[in-house]
């Protein structure tokens, strides 16, 4: 029950902060950080794939409702959540066992950066292809995806560093 409340509150806080505040951070439409992508990395290795896909679909629907898009975010989020576990297992392997969480402290900076960059880039590419429905301006699409990936990755790294610093600070007391 607490896990359901925690994830629901994470969805609400991330989507509301995205809509109210972070949708206005961009340079000529490029590099909008996706705060709700934090949900993609709220992951434990033992999570059920179907349950995670349902949570991803719920997050995508909520984002679609507020952005006025018709299923683009939901389809992209479900796709990325579906391939999340194999991607994490590809980089982490069996060296962490079945109880690892995805953060800098448990994976290391290099592995964490690889996972975040690939996951957010795939999400951006999916959303942008579904938004344009054409590959006519593919170079512009790739530049938007790269700029958005780097801004989102910077935000996620900043959040994770603050979270780990806060945890380390409270442990010392």
Image: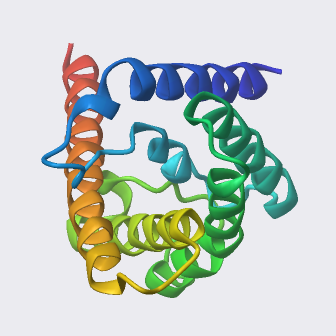
Quadrant housing residue 169? top left
Report the residue at 53% width, 84% height from top. Answer: 93
Residue found farthest to the front: 136
Instruction: Indicate the position of residue 64 as horizontal and vertical percent values.
Output: 65, 40
**Position of residue 114 in the picture relative to residue 9 (left or right):** left
For the C terminus, which image quadrant? top left
- Across and down, in percent, residue 103 comes to 38, 53
Q: Is residue 6 above or below residue 104?
A: above
Task: Report the residue at 62% width, 36% height from top.
Answer: 68
Total marks in image: 0
Towards the viewer: 71 or 134:
134
Residue 92 in the image, given as x and y percentages of width and height: 47, 79
Instruction: Pick the residue in front: 46 or 123.
Output: 123
Position of the N terminus, as image quadrant, is top right
In percent of the image, x 21 and y 52: which residue is there? Answer: 151
Picture colour scheme: rainbow
In x, y percent, where is residue 79?
68, 69
Closer to the camera, 55 or 145?
Answer: 145
Vertical arrangement, residue 46 with respect to residue 42, above or below: below
């Amino acid at each position: 029950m607490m896990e359901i409340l925690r994830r629901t509150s994470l969805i609400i806080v991330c989507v509301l902060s995205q809509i109210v505040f972070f949708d206005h951070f961009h340079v000529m439409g490029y590099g909008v950080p996706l705060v709700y992508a934090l949900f993609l990395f709220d992951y434990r290795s033992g999570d059920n794939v179907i349950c995670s896909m349902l949570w991803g679909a719920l997050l995508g629907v909520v984002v679609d409702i507020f952005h006025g898009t018709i299923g683009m975010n939901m389809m992209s989020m479900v796709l990325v959540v579906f391939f999340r576990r194999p991607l994490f297992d590809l980089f982490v392997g069996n060296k962490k066992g079945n109880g690892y969480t995805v953060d800098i402290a448990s994976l290391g900076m290099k592995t964490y950066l690889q996972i975040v960059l690939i996951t957010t880039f795939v999400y951006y590419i999916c959303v942008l292809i579904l938004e344009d429905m054409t590959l006519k301006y593919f170079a512009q699409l790739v530049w938007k995806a790269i700029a958005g990936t780097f801004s989102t990755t910077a935000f996620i790294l900043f959040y994770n560093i603050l979270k780990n610093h806060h945890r380390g600070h409270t442990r010392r007391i």
